[in-house]
Amino acid sequence: MTAFPFIHVSFALAGEAERRGWDAFVRDVFAPVTMYEVLTTPDAERLGLHRHQTLLAIGNTVVYAAAPAGAGLSTDSAIGNMLRALASQNAWIGIAIGVADLDTARAWVRERGWLSQSYPLLEDRYFLLDRSETLGMRLEFLAGALDNDPRLKAGWDPLWWRDAHPLGLEGLQSIGVSTGSLAAARAIFGEKLGWREIATRTLPEARCASFLVGDAVVEAMEPVDPQSPLADHARAVRGIWCLTFQVRSASAAAACLAAKGFALIGDRDRRFAIDPAQAFGRLLWFTDERVAGYPPIPIPHRVDRFAQLA
């Protein structure tokens, strides 16, 4: 098995006002720890980052939304154009995973028939695989740990969200990826990337196969109904469809969020989500149901166990 540490999950928003709104939403729902912000400082502009983003840690999960900024507001900016293209309803950019050595990782993906992509001046920090190669979920291969990563600091306690926060949040259960075929997901995630398949199950909307990605789970979701929103996503958007968080009690978590004024969809006693209209078009599920075969949550975050790429 190829065990990459899971670094973060991200998506794009069209503008700075929306991005700030998302950050406020996440703080209201999850009470995250702010790692750092990427802003249009002279150094960021020199590196061609061309965006604003705030990395937010929720237990052992890091999530952020990025919006074009500075030079990224120009149509001459590759990063700005990418963010604008992905800033659509219920679209995500993808996930970042850690590697010990970028040159070794680049060779590893070339052996699998893929081309690595890098932005100028950032080649020594990370490289990307095109979303079209990985079921619409962009993979970012990142060298080493993130700056100021609280998950690696002494005293970091991801169980605070379970024991002290009213949501009773145990952690990220899975990252759901839409697919027209579980066979295609197994070919990419299982055979080419070497992620171990750990579970299968059927949800009301999907037949699912789950894969362990170091310290996270990616769940491929094949629509049950070919006319469903999930099926539309698999055809037209592709990639990450949802995030699912595990909580101690679904009903207690639902009551907490309803008291904050959020509209909820699904079964409040088992598996529910915040209405995407209030979650910036993103689907965030909460459940207290365990999945047979999944590792215990929270999975410890470790970057000293990078994949041995062969």
Image: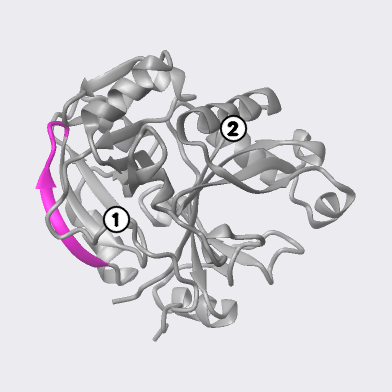
Q: Is residue 199 magenta?
A: yes
- Give residue 123's quadrant in the image: bottom right
- In front of the other: label 1 or label 2? 1
Task: Provide residue 258's location: percent of width, then percent of height.
Answer: 35, 17
> Residue 27: image x %, image y %?
54, 32
Crowding near the residue tagged with mark 2, few <14, some 14–19, many ≥20 C-alpha atoms within 10 Å: some
Q: Name the residue that disc number 1 marks.
A: 297
Q: Residue at x 45, y 25 (%)?
A: 281
Q: CA distance from mark 1 to mark 2?
A: 24 Å
Check residue 252 in the rendering and tell me which mark sits there, or answer none: none
Viewer-proximal residue, 295 or 18? 295
Check residue 159 for magenta coloring: no
- Going by the numbered disc 2, the residue's amino acid type is Asp
| Secondary structure mainly formed by the magenta segment | strand
Where 21 sits versus 305, above or below? Answer: above
For marks 1 and 2 on the same chain, the one whose residue lies earlier in the sequence: 2
Q: Secondary structure at mark 2?
A: helix
Residue 188 percent across, percent down from the top left: 30, 62
Image position of 310 (left or right of 40): left
Residue at numbered disc 2: 23
* Amino acid type, mark 1: Ile
Which span is picked out in magenta?
196-205
Could you tell me which residue is drawn at 29 percent across and 55 percent down? 297
Task: Residue lying at the far right in this picture: please name it.
Answer: 42
Asked if residue 275 can be seen in this view, the reply is no
Vertical position of residue 51 compared to residue 265: above or below? below
Q: Locate residue 206: give its quadrant.
A: top left
